[in-house]
Amino acid sequence: MTDTSSPDLAAAPEAAPADGTPVGPPARDPQRTHLRLMLTLTFATGIVDAVGFLGLDRVFTANMTGNVVILGMALTGADDLPVTGPALALVGFVLGAVLAGRALGSLTGAWSAMCTGLLCGVGTLVICLGILLMLWADAPHPVLLGVTGALGLAMGAQAATARAIAVKDVTTVVITSTITGLAMDSRLAGGSGPLWARRLLAVALMLVGATVGALLLRVHVGAGLVLAGLICAVTALIGHRRGRV
């Protein structure tokens, strides 16, 4: 059901030639590096969404499916759900994706210098937002709304960049389609179970990231954002060095 040509998480060792010629180091596989880096960003996204939902008044800044559902319910006045925060996150996400899309142009399927720049920008912005919250004790509600919109913009840019890098089934911001593929292509559904490892890891890393984000709220609402931003920035630098062809 699914193309099995995508790289697995671990490279197979290169066999030695029959004539005994020494084998050099295996060729670098940028696609494998892309997969690992996108999975790392998925973990960071879990942290950001945990902070947004638990620390910024029940708002998802990366998972726009959940955010749109919250916004729809809020418009009816259900359970005193927020309207402004989810709306700002949605607008920010779309804007971030548009700006990243304009910057990337037709650069798809590979890690470019623009990908590095965009992800470094995302990481820097998220770190700055975390530091702002840590330094501004009891920040007023308008400031928190601004943080929500800025986080939405950052996550939109990250999602667009991940889409351009094009690692199958790892969008970094949503796992619904990943779970669907995991179930649909499983042996239980009559499939051969390809790509199960990356799909399962994406789901698990989002879960673990959300857990870490919730735990860091006990330290400070900004702590999780600082960690997520650092992860994004380091991921960008590693991708720039090792993920390009």
Image (tube, rainbow, N blue to C red):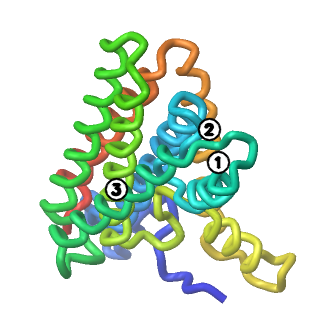
- Please give the name of the residue rendered at 74% of the width and 48% of the height, measured from the top-left corner: 78
Q: Amino acid at mark 1?
A: Ala
**In the drawing, does residue 85 fall left or right of residue 200?**
left
**In the drawing, does residue 101 fall left or right of residue 81?**
left
Q: Which percent across, then down, holds residue 196?
A: 66, 67
Q: Residues within 10 Å of mark 1 (few under 14, many from 20)?
A: some
Q: Nearer the viewer, residue 220 or 6?
A: 220
* First in sequence: mark 3 vs mark 2: 3
Residue position for label 2:
208
* First in sequence: mark 1 vs mark 3: 3
- Please give the name of the residue rendered at 37% of the width and 75% of the height, measured from the top-left corner: 18
Q: Nearer the viewer, residue 233 or 58?
A: 58
Q: Amino acid at mark 2?
A: Val
- Please give the name of the residue rendered at 50% of the width and 64% of the height, measured from the top-left corner: 170
Q: Amino acid at mark 3?
A: Gln
Q: Residues within 10 Å of mark 2 (few under 14, many from 20)?
A: some
Contact? badges 1 and 2 (CB < 8 Å): yes
SS under mark 1: helix
Residue position for label 1:
204
Q: Residues within 10 Å of mark 3 (few under 14, many from 20)?
A: many
**In the drawing, does residue 245 fall left or right of residue 38?**
left
**Which residue is situated farthest in the front direction here?**
77
- Give the Cα distance between marks 1 and 3: 20 Å
Residue position for label 3:
158
**In the drawing, does residue 112 fall left or right of residue 7?**
left
**Which residue is situated farthest in the right direction here?**
188
| Picture layout, residue 209 above or below residue 91 | above
Q: Nearer the viewer, mark 3 or mark 2?
A: 3
